[in-house]
Amino acid sequence: MINGMLNDELRALQSVVRDFANDAIAPVISQHYEDCTFPYELVKGMGELGLFGLPFPEEYGGSGGDYFALCLALEEIARVDSSVAITLEAAVSLGAMPVYRFGTEEQKRQWLPRLCSGEMLGAFALTEPEAGSDAGGTKTTARLVDGEWVINGSKSFITNSGTDITGLITVTAVTGVSDAGKKEISTIIIPAGTPGLGVAPKYSKVGWNASDTHELSFADVRVPEANLLGVPGQGYAQFLRILDEGRIAIAALSVGLAQGCLDESLSYANTRMAFGRTIGSNQSIAFKLADMEVRAHTARLAYYDAADRMLRGEPFKRQAAIAKLHASEIAVTNAREATQIHGGYGFMNEYPVARMWRDSKVLEIGEGTSEVQRMLIARDLGVTSALQ
Ligand SMILES: Cc1cc2nc3c(=O)[nH]c(=O)nc-3n(C[C@H](O)[C@H](O)[C@H](O)COP(=O)(O)OP(=O)(O)OC[C@H]3O[C@@H](n4cnc5c(N)ncnc54)[C@H](O)[C@@H]3O)c2cc1C
């Protein structure tokens, strides 16, 4: 299946992105990470390569590829750095995709060309201080007043929401209550800079230090009624779709990190001397490397499978959850083993594996925690108690 999926065009894309990661990202990223600065020049470079437009049609400024192409690019970038990879992932799969999937023709023409070129970044604001895994607990509200949505509330941990080039933030908000008393959630586009939109200073994070993450507040933010994405009340279904897809992308990113850990560890194990021989010549280290390869390979198969099903139009929810769960957990394991193989140097920030170790943990949290993935898989298997 894998060889069939990787045609010449996709292999060429992999090679171009791999060169970009090695030649453009690797030399500068540890300084950005150390300084917690956003790598604008790398975003520009990814824009020039067409990476932000990968899964979108050319008529909207896209590259005319598909979601699998995006995943391959994410894997190659994360092999070198995850801050840059998550910036691309969030911009495409969370920022631009809702506009493409649910927007009107006018909204697509207004936003997608600049989102596809990387000139502008989009953000998707679902998580709230008291509503993360339980996104149905959303408290942010949007009321329709005189042809405008008036939005009040707050959101937590929103990627790409406070850069100089952030153009729009898609926000989920409660727009009503059904007759059965259920919250009606809708998604609304808030252009960056809209009065009342507060962007808090960036978080101090354990990892992904060169990515942009902020808390947002909305104090009577007013946007035109036409900024609604799709139909009122469809917000819940919309973000479930966006997150199902996004899990395949996070799985690809996780595989990239797991592979990067192996790349670094292999070369270190073959050169680092102890007791008069390379550390890799010890079977215990060689076996760690073999196991890292097994993990990266099987997780790659899992995300290829989920992407394949999605592109064929088949149900893919369970496979996306499996890929995300497995890939994020093996990424954490590979990062831990890579640090171990590097000994004390693995604990020094100048070594890429230290960065990968710090970046790995969030993979088990973002776009659905490992527990949420297990709930989704159990529910899809028909375990009724997992519905709660
Ligand atoms: C760096 C970063 C970037 C992010 N970017 C974005 C973004 O761009 N947009 C966005 O909307 N969100 C974003 N998030 C938010 C992320 O998706 C949430 O943090 C995640 O969904 C978990 O929500 P929570 O943090 O509220 O944890 P909670 O939901 O409070 O969960 C806490 C713990 O309880 C567990 N738990 C909860 N419910 C259950 C249950 N029923 N059974 C068993 N265990 C349970 C969870 O698995 C977790 O271990 C980002 C987060 C981070 C850290």
Image (tube, grey):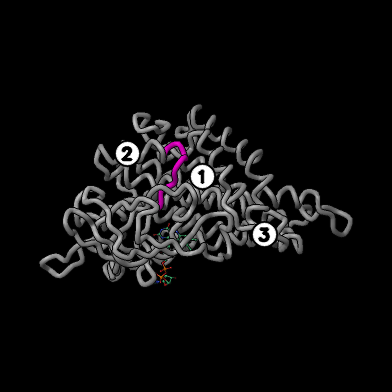
* Label 1 residue SS: helix
Residue with the most extreme right position: 276
The quadrant the C terminus occupies is bottom left
For ligand 1, give the image quadrant. Answer: bottom left
- If you read the primary sequence from the N terminus, does the residue marked by circle 3 or circle 2 appear first? 2
| Residue under pointer 3 | 354
Mark 3 and mark 2: Cα distance apart in space: 41 Å
Residue 126 lies in quadrant: bottom left
In front: mark 3 or mark 2? 2
Q: Mark 3 is on which residue type?
A: Ala
The residue positioned farthest toward the left in the image shown: 179
Q: Quadrant of the N terminus?
A: top left
Q: What residue sits right under mark 2 in the picture? A: 110
Q: CA distance from mark 2 to mark 1?
A: 26 Å
In the rendered structure, does residue 118 fall within the stretch colored magenta?
yes
Q: Nearer the viewer, residue 68 or 199?
A: 199
The amino acid on which the numbered mark 1 sits, given as a three-letter code, is Leu
Residue 347 position, x and y percent, is 71, 63
